[in-house]
Image (cartoon, grey):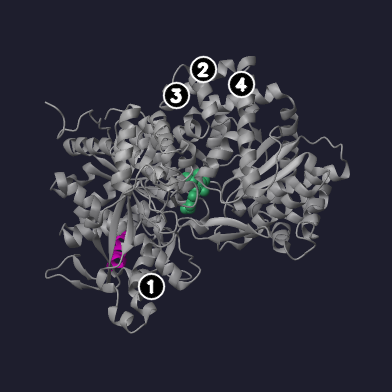
Amino acid sequence: MTDNADDFGRNMVANLYRHRGTTVESASARDAYHTLAVTIRDRLIERYARTAAAHYAANPRFVYYLSAEYLLGRQFEQNLLYTDTREQARVAASALGYPLDDLAALDAEPGLGNGGLGRLAACLLDSLATADIPAVGYGIRYDFGIFTQSFRDGAQRELPDDWSHYGTPWEFAAPDDRLEVGFYGHTEAYNGSGPRRRWVPGETVLGEPSHMLVPGWGTETVNIIRLWRAVASSDSFDLGHFSAGRYGDAVENVTHVENITRVLYPDDSTELGRELRLKQQYFLVACTLRDIVRRFRLRNEDFDHFADKVVIQLNDTHPVMAIAELMRLLVDEYALDWDRAWGITRRVFAYTCHTLLPEALETWPVSLVERLLPRHMEIVYLINHHFLADVERHFPGDHDRKRRMSLIQEEPERRVRMAHLAVVGSSAVNGVAELHSDLLSAETLRDFAQLWPERFHNVTNGVSSRRFLRIANPRLSGLLTERLGGEEWLRDLDLLADLESHADDRALQERWRDIKRRNREDLALHVKDATGVVIDPDAMCDVMIKRFHEYKRQLLKVLHIVTLYHRLRDDPAADVVPRTFVFGGKAAPGYHAAKRIIALVNGVGAAVNADPVASRRLRVAFVPNYNVTRAELIIPAADLSEQISMAGKEASGTGNMKLALNGAVTVGTLDGANIEIRDRVGDENFFLFGQDAAEAARTRRGYYDPRSFYERDPELRAAVDAIASGAFSGGDRGAFSSVVDSILYHDEYLVMADYRSYVDTQDAVDGAWRDADRWTRMSIMNTARCGFFSADRTIRDYRERVWHVDPVRVGPHHPVTAPD
Ligand code: 7GP
């Protein structure tokens, strides 16, 4: 497709007529936005057609990425970049009377995920397409994505995120491809013997796919992400009820079905909520596997080749029922014998674990699985039967081991252990950073790693340099492109290493500082708008952006802020460097402890910002509704990156990588990927504090008395006392008593034990900041040495260690439309 501004403009006007049914004179901003998006999309869809044709011809092994979450971020800017049409779009937008940036701001972020795991999925899809790997991402099209966060009296409020309220130009619905998914019911014997059985569901719903395009950067490949939503059949609507004026009853069945994909992770604190969640998981799995089998059969017949053509990556345990579902399809529907089906299944699946928290390893009550998915329960039992026989062969008579490894937990309630099913049914298992993978093998999944050491791998996470440097930080990317002599670094991030030898170059340092300052100015404008807080663009920008969770220790950050506040209050001339503390993050709606910490951050922020002395040096800005879009604004402005989880709890972290790449220096524990970041940037360019994973585990196992730290450390005592006294809750002593009690008497995440080391390290941060040249050098070194954390490298690692797939190059002409 040729792309001069005239063609682009003509296409756009044609699209305005055809898609919006309106005219140039009367186009609203939303008409203009939508039309521009569709015009950009046209460039991608043409590439997608060529990609599909190339894939069809090559019949390659595909990577199918199954994930309950995707945090794609806005598509508009990305697709402008990937189609190289920014200039044409600018001209076309102004022809309609709108500045391009105003239209870009109308792009809604599909918030189909919670945090790290969902954003990682999006980064990996981007890198898969960029590497020309045939891949499809499968997920759920939630009506309401992650809730919109606002604050009322400092506390988190959750509002529904109706992300596709105005329709989204990036999504193609495919109602023709609807398929049926069963739930409940019973199973019955086929004629004949053997494990084959028939499942007669008690309820069926329709799954409707839609897809979005996932373009690669600097290549012709456009892959897709396919999202499923539950739709009721038209006879679910009860016209009789409606005619009788019982409008609620009339739509009851419709609502019941469509609730399956209504929200991301329905609250599972009730029985019904748990059932809905499992239903959601199976819904994704059932639709997806049917689609994968359909795709396989387009070019292949014999299931013995299935594993040569298909690898299914399970993004944590949410889609793990896929293992039982594939067995059901192969054995019950395609009549393969059990062993052959199992051999195929085992080769097809691979499993990534994203956590170290025992409570995040999913289990489902046997009674629930039996009722909702009776056939799958039988299959899980049969897999378990064969598996435990295998364990017995390797470890004869070791009953305790079998009890530990079983797919079924017996006490206190019988439950299916999804992580065990995942490991047993996969050919490869990986953690997401070195420490995490080591801890999985040594602790969480030790018995399995002993039985099958060859299955266990590490694949350290990575992030998209396109989104988080090129798009988010145009100023710094411009400098990098200039210094590195082109944009090749966007495909080979190791090229950033060339900067290293210039880290002391005066001119570079000055440009670097200037860019950071201007990025902080941009952030200051947004913060003022979103929170009313005025921040000083010259102050150090100290950033903590991530989900709120006790193990991530936002509370430790709060104690530090209160400590500085006290120092200034006691001595207005105290040696405290001007800093802005920027927070962003949501807490799960049912996670009360984390929500209290959010309120505390806001309470402390209000006190600091209102204090005539402290506010001269310190400001606290809690940006509401942290999401990918906000991340892209905050990260480029950051000077200091807070990665302060209790060691041994953060599987990897990926915000740490994005911030370091943008030249923020990390203050962190030896946890997750922090370790690998420090190894690469050098310990002189990283602020380390606190206990390491082994020490922390020892402290937790032994006799730990958090109160003793409080008693011995006057600054810590003053900070805790201030919180307890109501100083940050308008005098209400009860407001944060649960927070205070948790750290004084339990302190599961060693906030008290690490406080002194943290505060002293922060004093060293102040010292480094005062020496602007030293700080700038550290910042440059962080960018220069973080090329490893590109998601492109992560994809290379998955290819070598797990997937064994080859790229397919997409030609410049579609075989059907190509000229002779
Ligand atoms: C997160 C981990 O907490 C984070 O450390 C990691 O960087 C990220 O995954 C990507 O691997 N986990 C989740 O977001 C999550 O939901 C529960 O984990 C299973």
Q: Earlier in the sequence, mark 1 or mark 4?
A: 1
- Tell me the quadrant of the picture where the N terminus can be found: top left
Report helix, strand or loop for mark 1. helix
Residue 124's image quarter? top left
Q: Residue flagged by tag 2: what amino acid is it?
A: Arg
Which of the pair 697/464 is nearer the observer?
464
Give the image location of residue 62, x and y in percent.
Answer: 26, 41
In front of the other: label 1 or label 4?
4
Look at the magenta stretch and give its main secondary structure. Answer: helix
Q: Residue flagged by tag 4: what amino acid is it?
A: Arg
Residue 684's image quarter? top right
> Mark 3 sits on what residue?
489
Report helix, strand or loop for mark 4. helix
Q: Earlier in the sequence, mark 3 or mark 4?
A: 3
> Mark 2 sits on what residue?
483
Q: Is residue 338 above or below residue 46?
A: below
Which of the pair 757/456 is nearer the observer?
757
Give the image location of residue 738, x and y in percent.
Answer: 70, 63
Query: What is the CA distance from the residue labelled 3 to the residue labelled 4?
Result: 19 Å
Q: Crowdedness of circle 3 by 10 Å Cα count: few (<14), some, many (20+)?
A: some
Query: What is the CA distance from the residue labelled 3 to the residue labelled 1?
Result: 53 Å
Residue 342 in the figure: left or right of residue 274: left
> Mark 1 sits on what residue?
367
* Residue 511, numbered circle: 4
Query: What is the CA distance from the residue labelled 2 to the residue labelled 1?
Result: 62 Å
Report helix, strand or loop for mark 3. helix
